[in-house]
Amino acid sequence: MSRLRAERLYKVFGRRADQAVAQLEAGTDRDELRAQGTTAAVIDASFEVQEGHIFVVMGLSGSGKSTLLRMLNGLLEPTSGRVLFDGEDLTALRPRELRQVRAHKISMVFQHFALFPHRSVLENAAYGLEVQGVPREERERRATEALELAGLKGWEGSWPDELSGGMQQRVGLARALATDADLLLMDESFSALDPLIRRDMQDQLLQLQKTLHKTIVFITHDLNEAMRLGDRIAVMRDGRIVQTGTAEDILVRPATDYVASFIQDVDRSRVLTAGAIMRDAESGAPALADGGVPEGATTVTTGTPLAELFTPFATSEQPLVVTDASGAPVGVIDRERLLTALAEEPRVAPPAGARNGNEVSAHA
Ligand SMILES: Nc1ncnc2c1ncn2[C@@H]1O[C@H](COP(=O)(O)OP(=O)(O)O)[C@@H](O)[C@H]1O
Ligand SMILES: [Mg+2]
């Protein structure tokens, strides 16, 4: 079910914003507007976020990510377009109603999370609830739970300056979790952290997500982070979303040269899975002819990253049999297929009309 929906969002800063939208729709270039002193920060952005999904918006600095995010919770009013949350048009709400939605349903976690230095960790985590007017006892109970979820059990009584940067960022996460908001908006929330701590936070978020099923929009300029976290990823460039898809979609079928250049440094062996490169029954996988798993064959599931396929091949020449979640064989991978898939240069996908959406191993 889609909980959040952005419909043709534009945000233009500067003079004659409305007119600029019409100009952009008519094909005027962003740089031309810039020369007139007008910044088109977000241009015609549309997407949907499913309940329980992490939707990542990825792009270089200045591509419009924060502006887009701020329109999603009404901190910025779109120049044009709509934001629907649970079917309700946020752009049509009165300021008072909007504040209500923001206080109860949407939480935001920023890159540099500002904690109140003279409040305890617990009070900091409970801050969102305080704003909502939740009584002290309840907010302390909920903040305690949220701190535990964020991995900070035992730190409730500490002061912010006793915490490392990573731990402070966890307090920010706890504050967002404590409010029970269904929609979390995270703007480069882990970007200021050291790589190891950052990975840790990513793991924690994925772990939390398994039980909490929040709907999350996560912003990052880091493609590897995007690929680890995103159920779906939107790639932004110069204010526009240039591609939306799963990590695998983007890696296997980059929509533009720009996206292709972006993904060059991605570790393909960790993002691509067995299911994406296997030969299936349609492409004549011989081992599947009789429908069963051949005796003695090693099996892997469709979701297994390619990095984990090397070990089986180290001990056997036999093709691997790929099974679905129920254990039924759905494809095979031989050693050559694995190596070609890893060596493949990402190629820009042909225009939509010419493309078969299911054809992952297009050259096979
Ligand atoms: N309040 C503002 N007034 C004018 N220009 C802005 C404002 N906020 C952002 N911009 C411009 O919009 C563009 C996108 O900015 P931003 O959304 O912050 O990008 P990102 O988060 O991807 O780094 C940039 O060119 C930025 O300078
Ligand atoms: Mg930003």
Image (tube, helix red, strand yellow):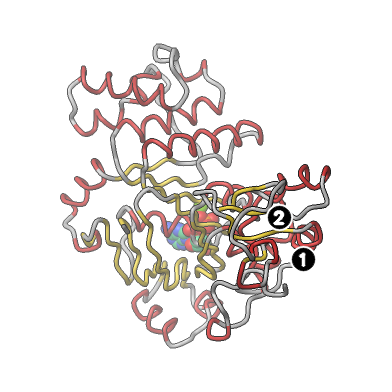
Q: CA distance from mark 2 to mark 1?
A: 9 Å
Q: Identify which amino acid the numbered label 2 is placed on.
A: Arg
Residue at (41, 26) in percent of width and height: 149
Q: Quadrant of the C terminus?
A: bottom right
Q: Is mark 1 within 8 Å of ligand 1?
A: no
Instruction: Return the x and y of residue 5 as percentages of the image width and height.
Output: 33, 62
- Asked if the residue under mark 1 is in contact with the one under mark 2, i.e. CB atoms within 8 Å, the reply is yes
Q: Which residue is mark 1?
A: 344
Residue 146 pos. (x, y %)? 36, 26
Residue 189's disc number: none
Number of numbered discs visible in the structure rendering: 2
Residue sitting nearer the eye, 225 or 364? 364
**Tag of residue 268:** 2
Q: Residue at x 44, y 27 (%)?
A: 150
Judge the density around disc 1: few (<14), some (14-19), many (≥20) Cα neighbours within 10 Å: few
Q: Estimate the x, y position of residue 105 in percent, counting from the top left.
A: 26, 44
* Kind of residue indicated by mark 1: Glu
Based on the displayed image, in which of its 4 quarters is residue 2 positioned? bottom left
In this rendering, would 199 be left or right of 141?
Answer: right
